[in-house]
Amino acid sequence: MAEKDDGLGLSLSLGCPDNNQIQNHHPSPAATPPPPPTAATRFPLNFFRSPLPFMQQHVSSSSDAFHPSSTDRNAEARSSLFRGIDMNIRAVSVIDCDEEVMVSSPNSTVSSLSGKRSEREDNDGESLDLDDDGGDGGDAAARKKLRLSKEQAAVLEETFKEHNTLNPKQKMALAKQLNLRARQVEVWFQNRRARTKLKQTEVDCEYLRRCCENLTDENRRLQKEVTELRALKLSPQFYMNMSPPTTLTMCPQCERVAVSSSSSSAASASLDRPTTNGSTHHHHHRPVPMNSWAAVIPPHHHRTGS
DNA sequence: GTGCCCCCGCCAGTTACGTCA
DNA sequence: GATGACGTAACTGGCGGGGGC
Protein backbone atom coordinates (compact mmCIF):
# COMPACT_ATOMS: atom_id res chain seq x y z
CA MET A 1 0.00 0.00 0.00
CA ALA A 2 1.41 3.31 -0.92
CA GLU A 3 2.23 5.78 1.76
CA LYS A 4 -0.39 8.41 1.98
CA ASP A 5 -1.85 10.87 4.29
CA ASP A 6 -4.42 8.97 6.20
CA GLY A 7 -6.14 11.91 7.62
CA LEU A 8 -4.28 11.54 10.85
CA GLY A 9 -1.51 13.67 9.53
CA LEU A 10 0.91 10.89 10.15
CA SER A 11 3.66 9.59 8.00
CA LEU A 12 6.48 7.18 8.23
CA SER A 13 9.05 9.65 6.99
CA LEU A 14 11.90 9.12 9.33
CA GLY A 15 15.31 10.55 9.01
CA CYS A 16 18.45 9.11 10.36
CA PRO A 17 17.75 8.51 14.01
CA ASP A 18 20.30 10.77 15.49
CA ASN A 19 19.58 12.34 18.77
CA ASN A 20 18.17 15.49 17.38
CA GLN A 21 15.75 13.69 15.24
CA ILE A 22 14.82 11.40 18.01
CA GLN A 23 14.06 14.38 20.10
CA ASN A 24 12.10 16.04 17.43
CA HIS A 25 10.28 12.97 16.46
CA HIS A 26 9.41 11.92 19.95
CA PRO A 27 8.68 15.04 21.84
CA SER A 28 7.89 14.67 25.45
CA PRO A 29 4.25 15.25 26.20
CA ALA A 30 5.23 17.16 29.27
CA ALA A 31 8.00 19.21 27.81
CA THR A 32 6.65 19.84 24.37
CA PRO A 33 3.58 21.90 23.73
CA PRO A 34 1.20 20.70 21.09
CA PRO A 35 2.75 21.42 17.74
CA PRO A 36 1.14 23.78 15.30
CA PRO A 37 -1.32 22.08 13.03
CA THR A 38 0.95 21.50 10.12
CA ALA A 39 0.41 18.64 7.76
CA ALA A 40 2.94 16.52 9.54
CA THR A 41 2.05 17.36 13.08
CA ARG A 42 -1.60 18.04 13.09
CA PHE A 43 -2.19 15.07 15.29
CA PRO A 44 0.98 14.36 17.13
CA LEU A 45 1.70 10.73 17.63
CA ASN A 46 3.11 11.23 21.04
CA PHE A 47 0.13 12.89 22.38
CA PHE A 48 -0.07 10.49 25.21
CA ARG A 49 2.74 8.04 25.06
CA SER A 50 6.44 7.67 25.01
CA PRO A 51 8.26 7.18 21.78
CA LEU A 52 8.97 3.51 21.94
CA PRO A 53 7.46 0.59 23.74
CA PHE A 54 10.49 0.11 25.92
CA MET A 55 10.12 3.67 27.03
CA GLN A 56 6.42 3.64 27.22
CA GLN A 57 4.89 4.85 30.37
CA HIS A 58 1.47 4.23 31.64
CA VAL A 59 -0.64 6.90 30.15
CA SER A 60 -4.16 6.10 31.05
CA SER A 61 -3.72 8.10 34.18
CA SER A 62 -2.81 11.13 32.18
CA SER A 63 -6.43 12.03 32.02
CA ASP A 64 -7.11 11.54 35.65
CA ALA A 65 -7.95 15.16 35.93
CA PHE A 66 -10.94 14.48 33.78
CA HIS A 67 -12.13 11.43 35.59
CA PRO A 68 -15.51 11.75 37.07
CA SER A 69 -16.25 11.66 40.68
CA SER A 70 -17.60 8.46 41.99
CA THR A 71 -20.85 10.21 42.66
CA ASP A 72 -21.24 11.03 39.03
CA ARG A 73 -20.35 7.56 38.01
CA ASN A 74 -22.69 5.88 40.40
CA ALA A 75 -25.50 8.19 39.56
CA GLU A 76 -24.95 7.50 35.95
CA ALA A 77 -24.81 3.81 36.62
CA ARG A 78 -28.01 3.85 38.61
CA SER A 79 -29.87 5.80 36.05
CA SER A 80 -28.49 3.72 33.25
CA LEU A 81 -30.12 0.66 34.65
CA PHE A 82 -33.39 1.94 33.40
CA ARG A 83 -32.20 3.40 30.22
CA GLY A 84 -33.02 2.31 26.74
CA ILE A 85 -30.97 0.16 24.53
CA ASP A 86 -28.49 1.08 21.91
CA MET A 87 -29.86 1.97 18.55
CA ASN A 88 -28.13 -0.95 17.00
CA ILE A 89 -29.88 -3.50 19.09
CA ARG A 90 -33.22 -1.96 19.50
CA ALA A 91 -34.52 -4.08 16.75
CA VAL A 92 -33.82 -7.15 18.76
CA SER A 93 -34.64 -5.73 22.12
CA VAL A 94 -37.47 -8.10 22.63
CA ILE A 95 -36.68 -8.41 26.28
CA ASP A 96 -37.86 -5.88 28.73
CA CYS A 97 -35.36 -3.32 29.74
CA ASP A 98 -35.84 -4.49 33.22
CA GLU A 99 -33.16 -4.15 35.78
CA GLU A 100 -33.69 -7.66 36.97
CA VAL A 101 -33.40 -9.05 33.51
CA MET A 102 -30.27 -7.11 32.83
CA VAL A 103 -28.57 -8.22 35.95
CA SER A 104 -29.69 -11.75 36.25
CA SER A 105 -29.23 -12.63 32.63
CA PRO A 106 -25.99 -11.04 31.67
CA ASN A 107 -25.31 -13.71 29.11
CA SER A 108 -28.59 -13.81 27.44
CA THR A 109 -28.90 -14.57 23.77
CA VAL A 110 -28.74 -10.88 23.07
CA SER A 111 -25.09 -10.60 23.81
CA SER A 112 -25.00 -6.90 23.23
CA LEU A 113 -27.22 -6.42 26.17
CA SER A 114 -25.08 -8.25 28.57
CA GLY A 115 -23.75 -6.76 31.71
CA LYS A 116 -22.17 -3.40 31.69
CA ARG A 117 -22.61 -2.98 27.99
CA SER A 118 -26.29 -2.61 28.27
CA GLU A 119 -26.04 -0.49 31.33
CA ARG A 120 -23.60 1.71 29.62
CA GLU A 121 -25.92 2.40 26.79
CA ASP A 122 -27.30 5.82 26.91
CA ASN A 123 -30.32 7.31 25.35
CA ASP A 124 -29.18 10.81 25.82
CA GLY A 125 -32.60 12.11 25.36
CA GLU A 126 -31.96 14.73 22.79
CA SER A 127 -29.62 12.62 20.79
CA LEU A 128 -30.43 11.36 17.39
CA ASP A 129 -32.63 8.40 17.06
CA LEU A 130 -30.47 6.84 14.49
CA ASP A 131 -32.45 3.71 14.17
CA ASP A 132 -35.58 5.54 13.41
CA ASP A 133 -36.02 3.88 10.10
CA GLY A 134 -35.16 0.66 11.70
CA GLY A 135 -37.30 -1.38 13.84
CA ASP A 136 -37.42 -3.13 10.57
CA GLY A 137 -37.21 -6.22 12.54
CA GLY A 138 -34.73 -8.96 12.26
CA ASP A 139 -31.19 -9.24 13.48
CA ALA A 140 -29.87 -8.19 10.11
CA ALA A 141 -30.61 -4.62 11.02
CA ALA A 142 -29.06 -4.98 14.42
CA ARG A 143 -26.03 -2.92 13.58
CA LYS A 144 -26.46 0.24 11.64
CA LYS A 145 -23.34 2.12 10.86
CA LEU A 146 -23.29 5.85 10.80
CA ARG A 147 -20.85 7.84 8.78
CA LEU A 148 -19.85 10.90 10.72
CA SER A 149 -20.04 14.12 8.85
CA LYS A 150 -16.93 16.12 8.15
CA GLU A 151 -17.99 18.71 10.63
CA GLN A 152 -18.52 16.15 13.33
CA ALA A 153 -15.22 14.50 12.59
CA ALA A 154 -13.45 17.83 12.65
CA VAL A 155 -14.85 18.73 16.04
CA LEU A 156 -13.94 15.33 17.39
CA GLU A 157 -10.44 15.69 16.05
CA GLU A 158 -10.04 19.08 17.59
CA THR A 159 -11.26 17.78 20.90
CA PHE A 160 -8.96 14.79 20.66
CA LYS A 161 -6.03 17.11 20.18
CA GLU A 162 -6.90 18.77 23.44
CA HIS A 163 -7.58 15.60 25.42
CA ASN A 164 -7.33 12.09 24.13
CA THR A 165 -9.81 11.00 26.73
CA LEU A 166 -13.03 12.52 27.90
CA ASN A 167 -14.78 12.46 31.18
CA PRO A 168 -18.51 11.79 31.15
CA LYS A 169 -19.39 15.45 31.29
CA GLN A 170 -17.16 16.30 28.40
CA LYS A 171 -18.45 13.33 26.53
CA MET A 172 -22.04 14.32 27.08
CA ALA A 173 -21.37 17.91 26.12
CA LEU A 174 -19.60 16.88 22.99
CA ALA A 175 -22.30 14.43 22.09
CA LYS A 176 -24.90 17.09 22.56
CA GLN A 177 -22.93 19.54 20.51
CA LEU A 178 -22.55 17.07 17.68
CA ASN A 179 -25.99 15.63 18.02
CA LEU A 180 -24.57 12.22 18.63
CA ARG A 181 -24.99 9.74 21.41
CA ALA A 182 -22.38 9.71 24.14
CA ARG A 183 -21.62 6.13 23.28
CA GLN A 184 -20.73 7.18 19.76
CA VAL A 185 -18.35 9.81 21.05
CA GLU A 186 -16.83 7.29 23.38
CA VAL A 187 -16.36 4.76 20.61
CA TRP A 188 -14.90 7.37 18.34
CA PHE A 189 -12.30 8.27 20.95
CA GLN A 190 -11.45 4.65 21.55
CA ASN A 191 -10.97 4.00 17.88
CA ARG A 192 -9.03 7.20 17.48
CA ARG A 193 -6.65 6.20 20.23
CA ALA A 194 -6.24 2.81 18.62
CA ARG A 195 -5.44 4.38 15.28
CA THR A 196 -2.93 6.70 16.87
CA LYS A 197 -1.29 3.84 18.64
CA LEU A 198 -1.12 1.78 15.50
CA LYS A 199 0.53 4.60 13.62
CA GLN A 200 2.98 5.14 16.43
CA THR A 201 3.84 1.46 16.39
CA GLU A 202 4.59 1.68 12.71
CA VAL A 203 6.83 4.66 13.32
CA ASP A 204 8.55 2.85 16.16
CA CYS A 205 9.16 -0.15 13.95
CA GLU A 206 10.63 2.01 11.26
CA TYR A 207 12.84 3.73 13.80
CA LEU A 208 14.08 0.44 15.19
CA ARG A 209 14.64 -0.91 11.71
CA ARG A 210 16.83 2.06 10.89
CA CYS A 211 18.69 1.67 14.16
CA CYS A 212 19.30 -1.94 13.31
CA GLU A 213 20.56 -1.04 9.89
CA ASN A 214 22.92 1.56 11.29
CA LEU A 215 24.26 -0.80 13.90
CA THR A 216 24.75 -3.48 11.30
CA ASP A 217 26.67 -1.09 9.13
CA GLU A 218 28.74 0.03 12.04
CA ASN A 219 29.42 -3.52 13.04
CA ARG A 220 30.48 -4.34 9.51
CA ARG A 221 32.77 -1.37 9.45
CA LEU A 222 34.34 -2.27 12.76
CA GLN A 223 34.85 -5.85 11.68
CA LYS A 224 36.62 -4.61 8.64
CA GLU A 225 38.72 -2.34 10.75
CA VAL A 226 39.69 -5.19 13.02
CA THR A 227 40.74 -7.21 10.05
CA GLU A 228 42.85 -4.37 8.79
CA LEU A 229 44.45 -3.83 12.16
CA ARG A 230 45.27 -7.46 12.46
CA ALA A 231 46.88 -7.32 9.07
CA LEU A 232 48.95 -4.38 10.20
CA LYS A 233 49.92 -6.05 13.42
CA LEU A 234 53.22 -7.14 11.93
CA SER A 235 54.17 -3.60 11.01
CA PRO A 236 54.26 -1.74 14.32
CA GLN A 237 55.91 1.36 12.87
CA PHE A 238 52.97 2.01 10.67
CA TYR A 239 50.75 1.22 13.56
CA MET A 240 52.34 3.87 15.75
CA ASN A 241 52.04 6.60 13.15
CA MET A 242 48.43 5.91 12.53
CA SER A 243 45.83 8.17 13.99
CA PRO A 244 43.06 6.34 15.78
CA PRO A 245 40.28 5.78 13.30
CA THR A 246 37.72 5.01 15.91
CA THR A 247 37.33 5.67 19.55
CA LEU A 248 34.92 4.00 21.83
CA THR A 249 34.15 6.37 24.60
CA MET A 250 32.42 5.83 27.86
CA CYS A 251 30.74 8.41 29.98
CA PRO A 252 32.48 8.36 33.35
CA GLN A 253 29.21 9.10 35.09
CA CYS A 254 26.85 6.59 33.64
CA GLU A 255 29.29 4.25 31.93
CA ARG A 256 27.37 4.36 28.71
CA VAL A 257 29.30 3.65 25.59
CA ALA A 258 29.29 5.86 22.56
CA VAL A 259 31.14 5.53 19.31
CA SER A 260 32.85 8.46 17.79
CA SER A 261 34.94 8.46 14.71
CA SER A 262 36.64 11.05 12.61
CA SER A 263 35.96 9.06 9.52
CA SER A 264 32.44 7.83 10.03
CA SER A 265 29.10 9.31 10.67
CA ALA A 266 29.28 9.37 14.40
CA ALA A 267 25.69 10.30 14.80
CA SER A 268 24.55 7.09 13.28
CA ALA A 269 26.39 5.10 15.86
CA SER A 270 25.27 6.90 18.92
CA LEU A 271 23.77 4.56 21.45
CA ASP A 272 22.02 7.24 23.39
CA ARG A 273 18.30 7.12 23.48
CA PRO A 274 15.95 9.94 24.24
CA THR A 275 14.74 9.86 27.75
CA THR A 276 11.13 9.66 28.64
CA ASN A 277 10.97 13.31 29.42
CA GLY A 278 12.20 14.14 25.97
CA SER A 279 15.63 15.29 26.95
CA THR A 280 18.69 13.58 25.73
CA HIS A 281 21.36 12.23 27.94
CA HIS A 282 23.64 14.66 29.70
CA HIS A 283 26.62 15.84 27.72
CA HIS A 284 29.69 13.72 27.79
CA HIS A 285 32.26 16.34 28.57
CA ARG A 286 35.12 13.99 29.12
CA PRO A 287 34.68 10.81 27.20
CA VAL A 288 36.92 8.03 28.30
CA PRO A 289 38.33 5.90 25.54
CA MET A 290 37.81 2.24 26.11
CA ASN A 291 39.75 0.49 23.43
CA SER A 292 43.40 -0.15 23.05
CA TRP A 293 44.01 3.53 22.58
CA ALA A 294 42.96 3.97 26.15
CA ALA A 295 46.46 3.03 27.12
CA VAL A 296 47.31 6.67 27.02
CA ILE A 297 44.75 7.47 29.67
CA PRO A 298 46.21 7.85 33.15
CA PRO A 299 45.07 5.15 35.55
CA HIS A 300 43.22 7.48 37.88
CA HIS A 301 40.66 8.13 35.17
CA HIS A 302 39.37 4.63 35.61
CA ARG A 303 38.87 4.78 39.35
CA THR A 304 35.36 4.03 40.32
CA GLY A 305 35.63 5.55 43.73
CA SER A 306 34.58 2.45 45.59
C1' DG B 1 -6.91 -2.79 57.42
C1' DT B 2 -8.77 -6.30 54.26
C1' DG B 3 -11.68 -8.74 51.09
C1' DC B 4 -15.52 -8.83 48.17
C1' DC B 5 -18.57 -6.87 44.91
C1' DC B 6 -20.03 -3.56 41.60
C1' DC B 7 -19.26 -0.18 38.26
C1' DC B 8 -16.56 2.17 35.12
C1' DG B 9 -13.13 3.27 31.50
C1' DC B 10 -9.90 1.54 28.59
C1' DC B 11 -7.76 -1.65 25.43
C1' DA B 12 -7.04 -5.36 21.93
C1' DG B 13 -9.28 -7.84 18.80
C1' DT B 14 -13.07 -8.50 15.84
C1' DT B 15 -17.15 -7.65 13.01
C1' DA B 16 -19.78 -5.27 9.80
C1' DC B 17 -20.85 -1.47 7.01
C1' DG B 18 -19.79 2.41 3.63
C1' DT B 19 -16.87 3.99 0.05
C1' DC B 20 -13.99 3.77 -3.79
C1' DA B 21 -11.23 2.04 -7.57
C1' DG C 1 -23.37 -3.96 -11.62
C1' DA C 2 -20.03 -7.05 -9.15
C1' DT C 3 -16.03 -7.28 -6.47
C1' DG C 4 -12.18 -6.69 -3.47
C1' DA C 5 -9.53 -3.47 -0.67
C1' DC C 6 -9.69 -0.24 2.66
C1' DG C 7 -11.28 2.84 6.40
C1' DT C 8 -13.85 3.03 10.33
C1' DA C 9 -18.07 2.75 13.36
C1' DA C 10 -19.52 -0.42 16.53
C1' DC C 11 -19.18 -4.56 19.33
C1' DT C 12 -17.03 -8.07 22.57
C1' DG C 13 -14.45 -9.77 26.31
C1' DG C 14 -10.99 -8.92 29.55
C1' DC C 15 -8.41 -6.15 32.84
C1' DG C 16 -7.40 -2.83 36.36
C1' DG C 17 -8.84 0.91 39.37
C1' DG C 18 -11.97 3.19 42.53
C1' DG C 19 -15.64 3.23 45.81
C1' DG C 20 -19.03 1.17 48.95
C1' DC C 21 -20.07 -2.30 52.27
Image: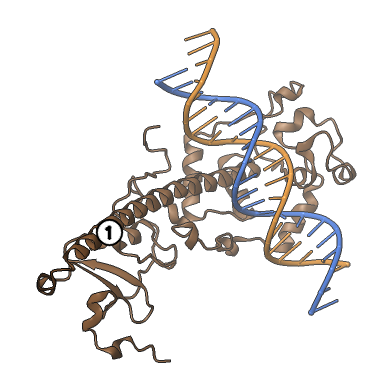
Chain colours: A brown, B blue, C orange
On screen, residue A101 versus residue A279, left or right, reads right
Of residues B7 and A134, the one drawn nearer to the viewer in this rendering: B7
Q: Residue at x 27, y 59 (%)?
A: A223
Of residues A286 and A219, the one drawn nearer to the viewer in this rendering: A219
Question: Which residue is disc 1 drawn over?
Answer: A223
On screen, residue A72 versus residue A157, left or right, reads right
Of residues A245 and B14, the one drawn nearer to the viewer in this rendering: A245
The disc labelled 1 sits on which kind of residue?
Gln
Q: Percent x, y for residue A67?
A: 63, 61
Q: Is residue A227 above or below residue A156?
A: below
Let me know if residue A103 appears in the view: yes
Q: Percent x, y for residue A2?
A: 37, 33
Q: Quadrant of the N terminus of chain A?
A: top left
Q: Is residue A95 above or below residue A157?
A: above
Q: Quadrant of the C terminus of chain A?
A: bottom left
Q: Is residue A250 above or below residue A227?
A: below
Q: Residue at x 54, y 46 (%)?
A: A194
Residue A68: quarter of image: bottom right
Q: Secondary structure beneath disc 1?
A: helix
